[in-house]
Amino acid sequence: MLSFWEIQSFVNCDYLIIGGGIVGLSTAIGIKEKRPNQIVYVLERGILPSGASTKNAGFACFGSVSELLDDLKKMSPQEVADLVLLRWEGLQLLRQRLGDNTIEFAPKGGYELIFQGQEHILEGIAQVNELLYPLFKQNVFEQKDELIHEFGFNKDKVKHLVYNKFEGGLHTGKMMKALWHKAQQMGIHIFTGTQAMHYEETEKGVQVAVKSGGSQEEMQFVCQKLAICTNAFTKQFFPDLDLQPGRGQVLVTQAIPNLPFKGVFHYDEGYYYFRNYQNRIIFGGGRNLDFEGETTTKMQTTPQIIEELKNQLFDLILPKQNVQIDHQWAGIMAFGQTKQPLVEYITNNVYIGARLGGMGVAIGSMLGEQLAQKIV
């Protein structure tokens, strides 16, 4: 039951955003930049963001050669180039808004590991460089096989390295904390532990029913415009969307003295990825081992994938080394038949921004900006 004061001061706003991750906060910030006098609220079901925004491995990337070559089998060259541009511009907007020092952005470059039998990937470097040259005004990818030995990888398995100097890593926690802080500084109110259940458009505006704090009683927020930015959880509101959840599992090692490689690394079309963070290896992926099982919103790790990550860690990356695993976790991403994200309106008052395809760090800021431009 709400008091008179609560009804007067808390439940009515101009713009309401469901989802307190990268896209939701970026949308709220974009709206507030354009409409500083409007009241903007953000609702987040968890105490912390509930999908992958605080659970990703901190990759500031826009696609490896093998990923982009695979994309070119399913999308036109222009569509692939446009998608890379969206990711690149999203990364630049994120850095501009928050500052490289704040998010610990480390432009150490990105690498793709190429194995025996994958030489066709090397043959595709020229094609991808030509496609991306208009965006970057120089070649993006180059072969760096001479670094395999220096990095300490298993030379019997890793036959080639492809380097991309435009990629890097960042601190996921500090990035999200800074986005949260920026939103609050701008006067955006963030309600955590507040789950939106359903919405209804009325003559007074859009009514959003929520539950909070374990209560079974619903309360109503009322807004003029609603943006749903819940990525993998968006099918709660729109069951027919072309959108499926995809779980990503990650582990982190103890500190390894003199870890020889820097930067971010991918292989197998981006299904596996690892990086050096403060001489720890953050290693994730393996969703392709069990697509059906990993099409879930359950936030938990599984023995099958964690064990395979450990096997590959000690076979490919740290051959014959004995390193302790300190922690493991999972996050939930969203995918569809296409890698194009969803930024569209349902009605004149209800909009969605979702389906980031595992590239939330890169796409999230620009997706939120595009949504803000549509909604104001």
Image (spheres, grey):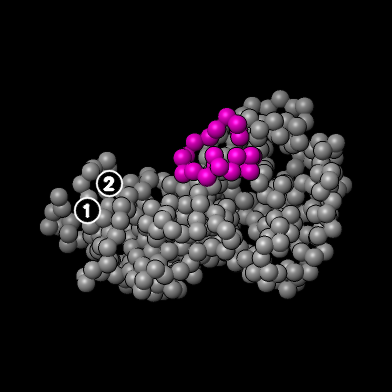
Of the numbered discs 2 and 1, the one sitting upstream in the chain is 2
Asked if residue 64 is positioned above or below residue 318 in the image, the reply reads: below
Callout 1: few (<14), some (14-19), or many (20+) C-alpha neighbours within 10 Å? Answer: some
Q: Amino acid at mark 1?
A: Met
Residue 68 seen by the camera: no
**Looking at the image, which residue is at 62% across and 55% down?**
60
What segment carries the magenta color?
282-306
Residue 196 seen by the camera: yes
Q: Quadrant of residue 338?
A: bottom right
Answer with left or right where residue 67 lies relative to residue 25: right
Residue placed under numbered mark 1 in the picture = 219
Q: Position of residue 357 (x, y in %)?
A: 57, 55
Observer-nearest of 180 and 115: 115
Answer with left or right where residue 225 lies relative to residue 83: left
Q: Residue furthest front?
A: 240
**Quick check: marks 2 and 1 in contact, CB under 8 Å?**
yes
Q: Position of residue 96 (x, y in %)?
A: 56, 64
Quarter of the image for the C terminus: give it.
Answer: bottom left
Q: Secondary structure at mark 1?
A: strand
**Looking at the image, which residue is at 84% across and 51% down?**
119
Q: Position of residue 307 (x, y in %)?
A: 63, 30
Residue placed under numbered mark 2 in the picture = 212
**Looking at the image, which residue is at 80% across and 54% down?**
121
Answer with left or right where residue 305 lies relative to residue 1: right
Q: Amino acid at mark 2?
A: Ser
Q: Secondary structure at mark 2?
A: strand
**Looking at the image, which residue is at 79% across and 47% down?**
114
Residue 345: say if magenta. no
Residue 299: say if magenta. yes
